[in-house]
Image (spheres, grey):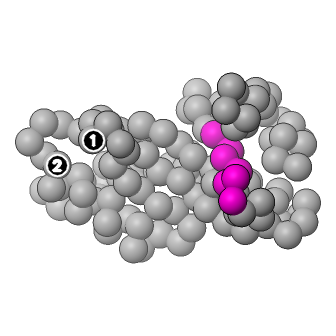
Amino acid sequence: MAIQVVKELGYKPIIDNDGDVFFRVQLKGFYILGTRNDNDLISVHFPQFWDIEEGEDVKYLAACNKLTRELKLVKTFIDDSLKSVSASCEFYCTDMESMRNNIEHSIKILCIIRSIFRRTLNELS
C-alpha cells in the first residue's frame, strides 16, 4: 500500500535491498519502513538530516528531546553513528485512506524539520 500511495502522491519509489521504500521529495531522501513484528505500524524516516558538531552533543540531545516532546507525530533523535540527527514519523494505519493521510502529513512535517531543528538549536544557544 505504501508504494501505491507514494506513486499517487507523484513520487518515484524504489525498493531497497532491505525491502524498504525509498523516495525523494525536494531533494530530500525519505524511507518508509514497515516493522516486521507489527504490520500495521509504519515509519516515514528522514535519516541524517543534520550533522552534529563535535563537543555539542548535549545541545543536540536537548534539541531532539524538545522537538520530540512538542511536535505531534515526529520523533527526532541522534542516530546510531552519534554523528547526525534523524527524524521519523510513526503511525498505525488500518486502510488505504489512513495510509495516504498519514504519509502525506509525515512528508509535510519532515520537509520542514531542518528549519524547525535550526530554530530550536538557536533558542537553546
The secondary element bearing badge 1 is classed as loop
What mark, if any, has residue 59 been given in the picture? Answer: none
Label drawn at residue 82? 1
Q: In the displayed structure, would residue 62 be above or below residue 118?
A: below
Answer whether residue 38 is magenta in the image.
no
Neighbours of disc 1 within 10 Å: few (<14), some (14-19), many (20+): few
* Element type where label 2 sits in the image: helix
Q: Residue 36 location in percent, x, y?
A: 70, 53
Write the residue at 47% across / 51% down.
Answer: 87
Report the amino acid beneath label 2: Asp
The reply to whether the magenta stretch includes residue 32 is: yes
Please state the extent of the stretch shown in magenta in the rendering: 31-37
Residue 9, position as x, y percentages in the image: 83, 43
Quarter location, residue 95: bottom right
Q: Residue at x 18, y 37 (%)?
A: 53
* Vertical placement of residue 22 versus 2, above or below: above
Task: Tell me the residue that label 2 is attached to.
Answer: 57
Q: Is residue 119 left or right of residue 99?
A: left
* In this view, the mark in front (1 or 2): 1
Q: Which quadrant would the C terminus be assigned to in this image?
A: bottom left
Instruction: Give the image location of residue 109, x and y in percent.
Output: 57, 55
Of residue 123 and residue 33, the one placed in the foreground of this image is 33
Instruction: Kindly identify the amino acid type of the residue bearing the numbered disc 1.
Output: Leu
Of mark 1 and mark 2, the one earlier in the sequence is 2
